[in-house]
Image (tube, rainbow, N blue to C red):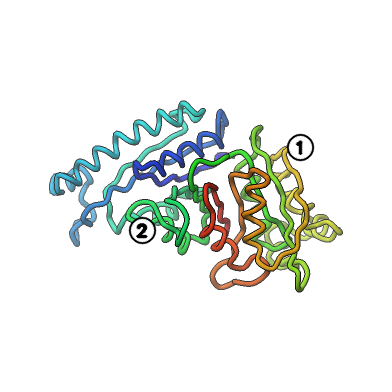
Amino acid sequence: MERKILAAVDGSVFSFNALRYLGQLFTDLEGIVVHLLYVVPGPPPAIGAEWVEERDRMLSLPKEVQARYRGARRFMEEAVLQLGRRGIAPGQVECRVQLTRQGVAADIVNEARRGDYDALLLGRRGVGGLEAMISGSVSESAVRQCYDLPLWIVDGKVNARRFLLPVDTSFNSLKAADHLGFILQGNPYAEIVLLHLAALMGGDTAPDWEELRELWGEEWCEANLRGPDSVHAAPEQLLIERGVAPERISRGRKEGCLRPHGPILRHSVSAECGTIVLGRRSQSKKRGLFAGVSDKVLDLANEVAVWLVG
């Protein structure tokens, strides 16, 4: 199945980190299409002129904005070459440079929702308060708004082929496993480490039976969620069904915890996992062991990519 990734870029070193990540993740793989979107900051279109063609609008813009636009076009040419050197052919890459309409962050989020993408990738400037790329707002806006689209936030130069997947039997944890399996299907390089974190008080998170049955069916849930080791067996089964080779999956040790974000970040370092894949609930469903953990992990993550799957 084709996988469509939208990568928002801005010509910075953080964008090149994102391109490096994509190239390492999808080296020489088929069924991958990367859409690069560069939104050039500038004055919004005049009221009533939203229909004006971009080339006509360019004529009325300040020279510095026109220069940024030309620079964005040159960056896109270099981006295609860089991805090609890393094993993503030019035919797998689509580029678009556009002037702002509602604002850089809003334009990216709108395109992510409109384009039927499988994930939105963003580069990020370091740790602390979700410091964003491009005018200081894109990553934060996407994280706060996009619960319906997987987000990949890349911080620094990271290993894109080794993944840490914290697991329990909740709906969102299994959705994260399903998304990871879909993206990695047929990937001969990727390795996945499952990490089972159990709450010290209250036991493990119980399965969300109603939501799980609706998505995967009664038979699948009974077969994979009733056993004594379902916390590992269910996500492993999803990964395998999606096309991940069983030998690419391993289990980390079970660990009890009060605040899961700490062990997750420590294990990502000790297991040399460059990507942490987390399920997260919508804002209206903040409950369970991993409630709020995805935001905390993202806030503290350094030199690691974090996938948020809602």
Q: Nearer the viewer, mark 1 or mark 2?
A: 1
The amino acid on which the numbered mark 2 sits, given as a three-letter code, is Ala
Q: Position of residue 115 (x, y in %)?
A: 44, 49
59 up-or-down from 285: above or below: above
The first of marks 1 and 2 along the sequence is 2
> SS class of the residue under badge 1?
helix
Residue located farthest toward the top when viewing the structure as drawn: 85
CA neighbours of label 2 inside 10 A, class few (<14), some (14 to 19), many (20+)? some
Residue found at x 41% / y 61%: 141
Q: Which mark is residue 106?
A: 2
Q: Position of residue 32 (x, y in %)?
A: 53, 36
Using residue 155 as the reference point, say whether residue 1 is left or right of it. Answer: right
Depth check: 94 or 156 in front? 156
Q: Which mark is residue 247?
A: 1
Depth check: 43 or 94 in front? 43
Give the Cα separation between the discs numbered 1 and 2: 41 Å
The amino acid on which the numbered mark 1 sits, given as a three-letter code, is Glu
Residue found at x 67% / y 62%: 171
Using residue 226 as the reference point, say whether residue 83 is left or right of it. Answer: left
Residue found at x 52% / y 47%: 303
Residue found at x 51% / y 28%: 87
Quadrant showing the C terminus: bottom right
Q: Position of residue 273 (x, y in %)?
A: 63, 44
Res 229 quadrant in image: bottom right
